[in-house]
Amino acid sequence: MREREQLFRDGWHCVGFWHTHPEFDPTPSPEDRALAAEHARAALTLTNGMVFAIVGTRPLPAGLRVWCHTGSALIDMVAEVPRSEPTDAS
């Protein structure tokens, strides 16, 4: 907690965490859920929630799962692929 507070004072802000799973469709394990809740509760004085992402073995973007933990609930989010805008080739 002291390290997190010092980093915040130094201008560094953690908005979330990611890791990989050897699953086609990744789902958070009980350990993932506990870690997400712990970090989200620790950050409640600074944020409304923390982002947690797991990358599975399915090709992206389908293999990416994203959640937000509010400190009391893990909310499933939708990962969207940004559309590429046409460029002016002239």
Image: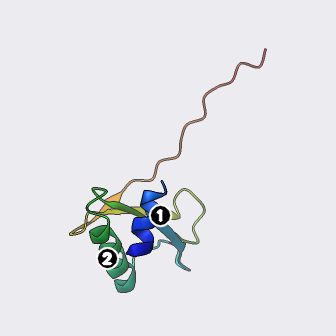
In the picture, the quarter occupied by the C terminus is: top right
Q: Nearer the viewer, mark 1 or mark 2?
A: 1
Q: Is residue 14 visible?
A: no
Query: Which residue in the protein does label 2 denote?
Result: 38
Seen at 30% across and 70% down, the residue is 42
Q: Earlier in the sequence, mark 1 or mark 2?
A: 1
Residue kind at label 2, given as amino acid type: Glu
Q: Is residue 38 above or below residue 11?
A: below
| Label 1 environment density (alpha carbons within 10 Å; few <14, some 14–19, many ≥20) | few
Please name whichever residue, 14 or 8, is drawn nearer the observer in this view of the structure.
8
Dividing the picture into quarters, in which one does residue 27 lie? bottom left
Q: Label 1 sits on what residue type?
A: Leu
Q: How many marks?
A: 2
Dot 2: element: helix
Q: How far across and how far down the image is residue 54, in percent?
A: 48, 69
Secondary structure under badge 1?
helix
Residue at far bottom of view: 31
Residue 17 falls left or right of residue 44: right
Q: Position of residue 11 (x, y in %)?
A: 48, 53
Residue under label 1, please give it. Answer: 7
Q: How far is the residue under mark 1 from the one under mark 2?
A: 18 Å
Quick check: 9 above or below 29? above
